[in-house]
Amino acid sequence: MEVVIIALAATLGNLLIGWDSSTIAGGMTYIKQEFELEKDPTLEGLIVSMSFITGTVVTIFSGTISDMVGRRPMLITSSVMFFVAGLVMFWAPNVTVVLLSRIIEGVAIALAVTFNPLYISEIAPPDIRGQLNTLTQFACSGGMFLAYILVFSMSLLQSPSWRVMLSVISIPSVVYFLLTVFYLPESPRWLVSKGRIVEAEKVLKRLRRVDDVSGEMALLAEGLNPGGEDISIEEYVVAPASEILVNQEAGKDYIKLYGPNEGVTMIAQPVDGQGSMLSRSMLSMHGNYASRSMLSQQGSFSSQAVANLKDPIVNLFGSLHESTLIESGRSNSMLINNANSIFSTGDPEASPFGTSDNLRAPLNPYHGGADRGYGSKDMLGMRSNSSLVHGHDETPRNTDIGGGWQLVYKSTDDAMGGKREGLQRVYLHADPSAAAVSQSPHVSFVGTSGYDMHIDGGEAFQAAGIVSRSVLGTSDALSIPEVAAKGPKWRALLEPGVKRALIVGIGLQILQQAAGINGFLYYAPQILEQAGVGALLSSLGISSISASFLVNIITTFCMLPCIFISIRLMDVAGRRSIMLYTIPILIVCLLVLVLKQYFQLSSVLNASISAISVVVYESVFCMGLGIIPNIICAEIFPTSVRGICISLTSLTYWVCTLAVTLTFPYLLQILGLSGVFALFVGGCIISLIFVYLKVPETKGMPLEVIIEFFAIGAKPGTDPAELGMKD
């Protein structure tokens, strides 16, 4: 897939980040010796942390600049800064020039850390967005592994040159520069936000390798105007159409779904006759089947939120994903299985990462003659009053927007020919858990309006939609270029959904550093040396410094299979689940490092326990807290202010990183290794609680749908149980 290759090219910047972190960690040993910094921990900490100080300053402005000039120029600038920093370090005659190089490197690192996940999120399909973004961590750890091999090899020399260690980064940075300039396209979401519609469509066709991207283009335009006061959730029961239903239109409130031949193929009826509250829906069948709504299957939503202290947004996202659980890599849902065989958005085997079945749930999988992929003709459209129109001048012919979601439109025109109120967009998703409701040959759908829909011999299922006013369609609505020309809305930062998303993003960045990872990464050689790892490997005939580098080679190598596991699970188990399962392992590793001092251990056993704990900690951290905060931050903000919000979360990251790296040498002197690890235990425990209560699951959802969920769950003064009701 083209998008996979482009994402891999973008992750070269993350490889350079990993390379830098390892070479500075190894090179500091020799820099301290040459410039006699052993007695000056302040200057030592300043050299390591200077890139973070620079990153903090750069991040303040980079988001706004990115929203102005685009994502691609930021990646190009990053590659140039890596190259220049390497050259300056190769020349460095004194500490001042070393600090200058670290300042330049800080610019490069800040831009790569901030915009690589953002860029990948904006170009990737929802189905594999998490996998592609996890490649950034794989590349970073791969860079660390390769750099430690170089550092270890040079440490065996009689006179190791730290200047060469730290300047080699200029070589791969040239490759990164060439790729960003000549191969990487601009983000289509940014292009739409600037009204450059033709360019955005061209990029999307290249990324998706299809000719019809009208649905996704409409999605990007709708993303410029997320949420709104009129946002609501509506629930439908969908079934194959029959002649009786098609002919009996008078007074019947249902939506007709059109197939490729312009005929009515499916009927979608709001379960209460008005398209309002999900929690009041009821599906009745012979056999007394009780419905399990996609977005309300957990019963009393508000009472549960109070009882278990979870943020309502967490419950809202969770109830969606609980309806798409998989078992042993296969979905239990007949709807999804049918969709995979008949109406898949692509061949799972075509992707090197595979595709999880639980992400393939198109609404209308009943017509095998339809085209495959994003260009499929057998999708939902919209027609006239109270119907979904296919072929409207402003609405897309292709409604598949990925992850099993459809973007459809509902007319709000007065049925008697009165005032035109424009279109309502509907982000529609089938409830896979309800796919088996129609195994009986006779099905009856009962809405609170009292109108029964009887379907003979067909398969029916439930679907829920997020409904709000569209920016497209009618004379008083805006076209895509007109919406895009409005530009960023700074007041959007004060929207309840955006504020809630900022809490999640900033909280994750703080707690990522509170778990202590940068203390491990930048001071791991010294930590292992103090733990006696040199004594453990003394029989190999190498110095204790080289031994600590060798352990770091082993550590970074062990990261790679762990991150590969994370790649496979990111869009299956999900971001939230991975963090909830990996953080307890971090706590155990840190507790081992704290408690081992209370036992009488031999030097070899002490060194072994320390080395194993460090290896497991760093490897497992990379699976969860190491990469997922950046992934989530790149997913949860509206397009118009995504760069600004990413800057705020990245600024938090840099400030916290700076605090950890500056204070770590002092903490080691005051508290010792065990005391520092005890602080990190507290940070991990707080992280676990925060993720459980505040962080929602975003796997497999289009970015614009994620934003709508935040807008719904954060509506002020609205009881979560009444989210489906109009204000």
Image (cartoon, rainbow, N blue to C red):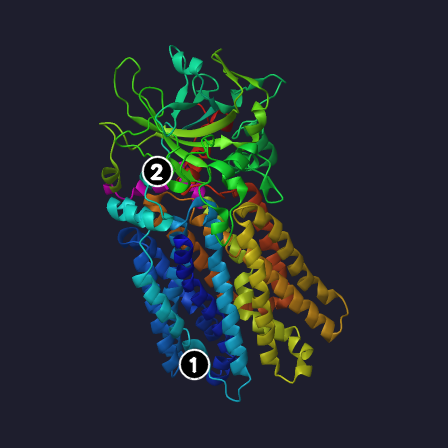
Residue 374 % position (x, y): 39, 41
Residue 339 % position (x, y): 50, 36
**Mark number, residue 150:** none
Is the residue 723 above or below the residue 198 in the image? Answer: above
Q: Residue at x 39, y 30 (%)?
A: 380
Q: Residue at x 51, y 26 (%)?
A: 462
Does the stretch in magenta take in 498? yes
Residue 524 left/right relative to 698 = right
Identify the magenta region.
485-502
- Residue 422 location, quadrant: top left
Question: In the structure shown, which secondary structural element does the residue marked by tag 1 occupy?
Answer: helix
Residue 381 left/right relative to 522 = left
For badge 2, the amino acid type reads: Gly
Q: Which residue is mark 1?
A: 163
Work out whether residue 323 or residue 392 is closer to the camera in this orientation and state it.
392
Categorize mark 1 by other alpha carbons within 10 Å: few (<14), some (14-19), many (20+). Answer: many
